[in-house]
Image (cartoon, rainbow, N blue to C red):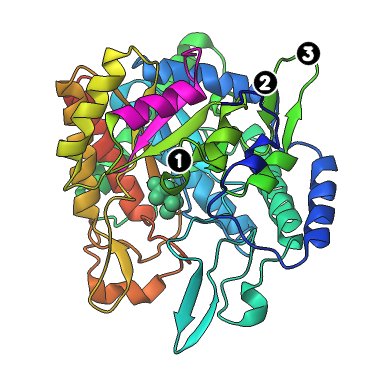
Amino acid sequence: MNNHWTPSSWQKKIATQQPVYQDQAQLDDALRRLTKLPPLVTSWEIENLKEQLAEAAAGNAFLIQAGDCSESLEDCETDAIVRNLKVLIQMSFILIYGSMKKVIRVGRIAGQYAKPRSADTETREGVTLPVYRGDIVNRSGFNEKDRQPDPELLLRGYERAALTLNFIRGLISGGFADLHHPENWDLDFASDSPRSRQYHKMVDSINESMHFMEAVLGATMRESRGVEIFTSHEALHLSYEQAQTRHVPRREGWYNLSTHLPWIGFRTRAIDGAHVEYFRGIVNPVGIKVGPGMEAGELIRLVDTLNPSNEQGKITLIHRFGAEQIADCLPPLIEAVKDRQLNVLWTSDPMHGNTYSTSTGVKTRSFDQIISELKQAFQIHGANGSILGGVHLEMTGDNVTECVGGAGKLAEPDLHRAYKSAVDPRLNYDQAIELSFTIAEQMKANGSA
Ligand code: PEP
Ligand code: CO
């Protein structure tokens, strides 16, 4: 095997899930411009996150990685960003309050624009077109023009990611997450539900403790200084990722500066494939989706390839088996990782193994199945002497109707009311807040708090 790595060495391997562009010169031109643009994140932020992920692997912190299945260029607007940030911060406070543990917040945000698909084409009423692969590649409308991969969208995606991140950074440093601003605590949540009462009790209790501490210290506590938000996306479109992969002065190695935490999707994990080749050369911490059919041997080879020095904080395993399969699939993998003493952070994605279609063909997930997989994940790690150090969720701050169940008792006939996702169904605001309480309870119940 040729071990020499460069940001483009993946091009010698088989790259699945890549769009086919009609005009190579146009693509090259877009990539050339992308290569010159400034980075979206910095190497010190990346190193900071890696250290924190190592803490989570050791059980001293907890990762919440959450956001849209697929961001859209159109949704890069003020209110949507504020709502998504708000729910992420509120969820993190619920976890901190419930577990008394540090929480690491990572959005599926500012770059989650490329989607793996199960087929290259889509056929409707006898017409076959290229499949929609995410807003950085093509458009979701079902017509020839929209479905043609457009290299200019790579730049539009990069720009939207930059705008999103710029706004998030401004909000955070401007005090958006400051506990003194009650408007940030407003819960637009079914006010008669027990979770709502629990939430308000928590807010009162935090306020009391804060005022107590301020009286003791004689100073105002500014929580916002401590709130960090990191970004992540599936590094699927390898030319895009390569264009943002850089050397940084006074540091060794190559950083992917388009995001803090890129991950390898379940469909692109082939050990001899282009994605693994790309990932093995970057310094960033990386996520690996782990699901049914992945044998212990395959997982070990993947982790060894991506982290030959067994560096702490480098690997986050994101398992997504589904509520029906986790009990059979997860224990042998935990055993193998323990056996080899590999340093990994285990996290649970209770979304991607629980997707199904209703009888009318609507893609959904059941809140109960999601809760079931999460509870099993905590229990299985506890019983096998391992640590579940995080969760990976698809959610939004909007009140969409994409997943069934939860306190609002959404049923299948309700799904059409506000189904907005172009790809996978997300938890809505209420469901995300409700789930956070369950996570906090599980952290306590399973001794990880
Ligand atoms: C995703 O996270 O949106 C996704 C496609 O997941 P997976 O690779 O686990 O199927
Ligand atoms: Co998804």
Instruction: Calculate the distance from the C-alpha at mark 2 to the C-alpha at mark 3.
Output: 11 Å
Which stretch appears magenta? 297-320
Residue 275 shown left or right of residue 60 in the figure: right
Q: Residue at x 26, y 63 (%)?
A: 404
Q: Residue 213: x and y, percent?
A: 44, 15
Give the SS element for disc 1: loop
Residues tagged 2 and 3 counted as in contact (Cβ below 8 A): no
Q: Magenta includes 315? A: yes
The kind of residue on which mark 2 rests is Trp
The kind of residue on which mark 3 rests is Arg
Q: Nearer the viewer, residue 112 or 192?
A: 112
In the picture, which quadrant includes the N terminus? top right
Of labels 2 and 1, earlier in sequence is: 2
Q: Which residue is mark 1?
A: 270
Give the SS element for disc 2: helix
The kind of residue on which mark 1 rests is Ala
Q: Nearer the viewer, residue 326 or 82?
A: 326
Q: Which residue is mark 3?
A: 250
Q: Residues within 10 Å of mark 2 (few under 14, many from 20)?
A: few
Mark 2 vs mark 3: in front: 3
Q: Residue 248: x and y, percent?
A: 77, 22
Of labels 1 and 3, earlier in sequence is: 3
Mark 1 vs mark 3: in front: 1
Give the SS element for disc 3: loop
Of labels 2 and 3, earlier in sequence is: 2
Residue found at the very far bottom of the displayed protein: 125
Q: Which residue is mark 2?
A: 44
Q: Residue 156: x and y, percent?
A: 73, 58
